[in-house]
Amino acid sequence: MSREPTPDLSPVVSDEVKYTTCYMCACRCGIKVHVKDGQIRYIEGNRNHPVNKGVICGKGSSGIMQHYSPARLRKPLKRVGKRGEGEFVEIEWEEALSTATEWLAKIRATDPKKLAFFTGRDQSQSLTGWWAAQFGTPNFAAHGGFCSVNMAAAGLYTIGGSFWEFGEPDWDRSRYLMLFGVAEDHDSNPIKTGLGKMKARGAKVVSINPIRTGYSAVADEWLGIRPGTDGLFVMALIHELMHADQIDLDYLVRYTNAPWLVIDAPGTA
């Protein structure tokens, strides 16, 4: 009786491997991209990368789908129909840059502040601000101003550092961790690793989220607040801490800018 052939569980799927970082979220996990005949065939985590140590989520491994998506823009698009009709044609970069230069030159020559623009999740927001300053307009914004930059700034002011917008929790020594609206599609690999460390040594994890999925499902306690009430919850929590005299004022004075945010002036607005 013949034996069944043993399948190759680790077949060679590429003739070249490129080392880079994942761009499917701001986490920037290290990845190894397997390329064959100039085409991406497979994406895996890089075990030598300090952020994810080889772990890769479903979003990261599906980056190949984004790269080869038929909806991906290959060239600039020019609207040829009326606004809202969705009629566009591809044009070359030379034409696009020439058109933009013509529009912007007129605005800059008259009143640069009439230009207002918004950029998406790019990693050159400092360059965006510099460009706006050179042009002469203060009216610009980017995704980070509504999401990552403000949280990163809060981390710098409170705990002295921040890993992007995700903060820098002390995974090794924290005994109590609160997750506010953390989504599983962002920074998932470092958070999963950190939560594993905390759970293993008995630390308590509390998740504040309208839905009980992902991190909320494995948390020791889940607070299912109503969407949009995060601020009210935090202010109520601060109120109760102050009322119970459970705030470390010496710590706030020494390590934060809280003393500059409170003005003791009864009777004034």
Image (cartoon, rainbow, N blue to C red):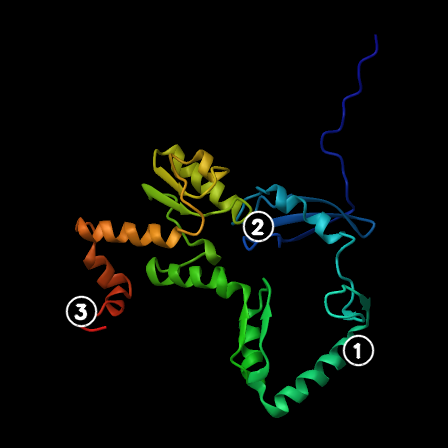
Q: Is residue 102 left or right of residue 257?
A: right
Residue 133 visible from this viewpoint: yes
- Give x and y (percent) for residue 64: 72, 48
Q: Is residue 172 left or right of residue 52?
A: left
- Give x and y (percent) for residue 42: 72, 44
Q: Nearer the viewer, mark 2 or mark 3?
A: 3
Nearer to the camera, 223 or 206: 223
Whether label 1 touches label 2, CB < 8 Å: no
Q: Amino acid at mark 3?
A: Asp
Whether label 2 touches label 3, CB < 8 Å: no
The residue lying furthest to the bottom in this view is 109
Q: Amino acid at mark 2?
A: Cys
Q: Which residue is mark 3?
A: 264
Find numbered disc 2 in the image and state the secondary structure of the residue it sits on.
loop
Q: Which residue is mark 1?
A: 95
Q: Is residue 125 above or below residue 207?
A: below
How far apart marks 3 and 1 lie (CA) works out to 60 Å
Mark with earlier residue (1, 2)? 2
Q: Amino acid at mark 1?
A: Glu
Quadrant where the N terminus sits is top right
- Give x and y (percent) for residue 79: 77, 70
Q: Is residue 105 left or right of residue 127?
A: right
Q: Which mark is residue 126?
A: none
How far apart marks 2 and 3 lie (CA) works out to 46 Å
Q: Which residue is mark 2?
A: 29
